[in-house]
Image (cartoon, rainbow, N blue to C red):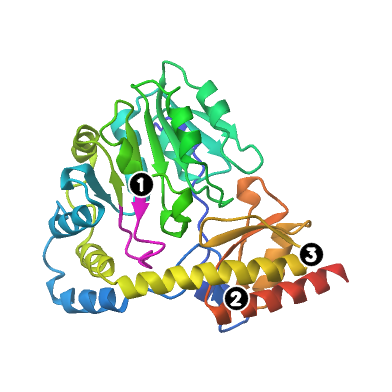
Amino acid sequence: MKLTIPEHIKNLIPYPPGKPLEELEREYGITGSIKMASNENSLGPSPKAVGAIAAALSNLHRYPDGSCYYLAQALAAKLGVDAGQIVFGNGSDEIIALLAAALVMPGDEVISSKPSFLVYPKVAQAQGGINRVVPLNKMHHDLDAIAGQITDRTRLIFLDNPNNPTGSVFSKEAFNAFLAKVPESVVTVLDEAYLDFVDHDKRIDVRDYLAGPKPVVGLRTFSKAYGLAGLRVGFGLMSPAIADCLHRVRGPFNVNSLAQIGALAALGDEDHYQNTMTMTKEGILWLSKGLTALGLTPLPTQTNFFLVDLHQDGKAFYQAMLKKGVIVRPMTAYALPTYIRITVGTAAENERLLQAVSRTLTELAA
């Protein structure tokens, strides 16, 4: 074949996926593993969501509702916004890609931080855009440096708040000062995938900015707090004008039927949501004390995960943990070679993880 592939596509590095749990167990000859690497909800999905999905299986021959009507109405009522300010996607990842597809032309610039969610620079490059990547400052977004990178070609700024992988947040006051420096032609994207886990006094309410002169988009997901990562359903909160642009470029049935049904049911299961919050908060406190006692440095977090400085090679540590049936995330892809990322699990999972960490530290020190 003599395909003509644009250079910006040929140079695009695919997102690094993890191996399936079953394949890791086969490869390492282990069973009963626990996965604490992908920031999933260890309680699993809402039982109400599972029941609603099971009841809908006989309708799989029908196309999904392209407007996500019932989910949009329920979410709009819960959040106090107009349904026209919500755009749903196949995970919030798709909203990120739709923003780039709608707003970025070849040669336009997109600003993000490093490290942060790896998808931001990928979607910009896929559109032929130019990435301006600003290093974190002491594991926090450097908002002053980001503002200093804005030019007349800047179209999008991505800020994951909380940041992935550090778990850090910036304040509303800092965001307001930053936004004052951003031109009205630039869309600022607050990726709030982990907002549910943030202390209420540390939250920024993106709804306060939707009608303002500076365009701000908030991204959220049902993958984390609601435990529906396998269904892939996320959404963006934005002005109707930006929503209209995204609807022009999105696929007609981009959120499948089961995802819509599951998300609607999960949205109404307050008990499961609160159980998730309790499990996460208690797990953060317990794991933080335990990891610190072992001589490691877990960073303060406003999420359901920890970034942990091992003070040694993170990839070797990850591989040693695998042999014990505990899967964590090495941070080599984020240019943090001595760190791992650990998802908060159930009490039993947290205890098993801490025991595995202790044994691994002893083995690697021998």
* Residue 143 rendering spot, x and y as whole percentages: 54, 31
Q: Residue at x 71, y 72 (%)?
A: 357
Q: Quadrant of residue 126?
A: top left
* Residue at mark 1 to residue at mark 2: CA–CA distance: 29 Å
How far is the residue under mark 3 from the one under mark 2?
17 Å
Which residue is more in the foreground, 313 or 30?
Answer: 313
| Residue that carries the numbered disc 3 in the rendered image | 295
Q: Is residue 68 above or below residue 348?
A: above
Q: Quadrant of residue 127?
A: top left
* Secondary structure of the residue carrying numbered label 2: helix
Q: Is residue 70 magenta?
A: no
Q: Which residue is mark 2?
A: 350
Q: Residues within 10 Å of mark 3 (few under 14, many from 20)?
A: few
Screen quadrant of the N terminus: top left
Which residues are the magenta region? 220-234
Q: Label 3 amino acid?
A: Gly
Q: Which residue is mark 1?
A: 219
Picture quarter with the C terminus? bottom right
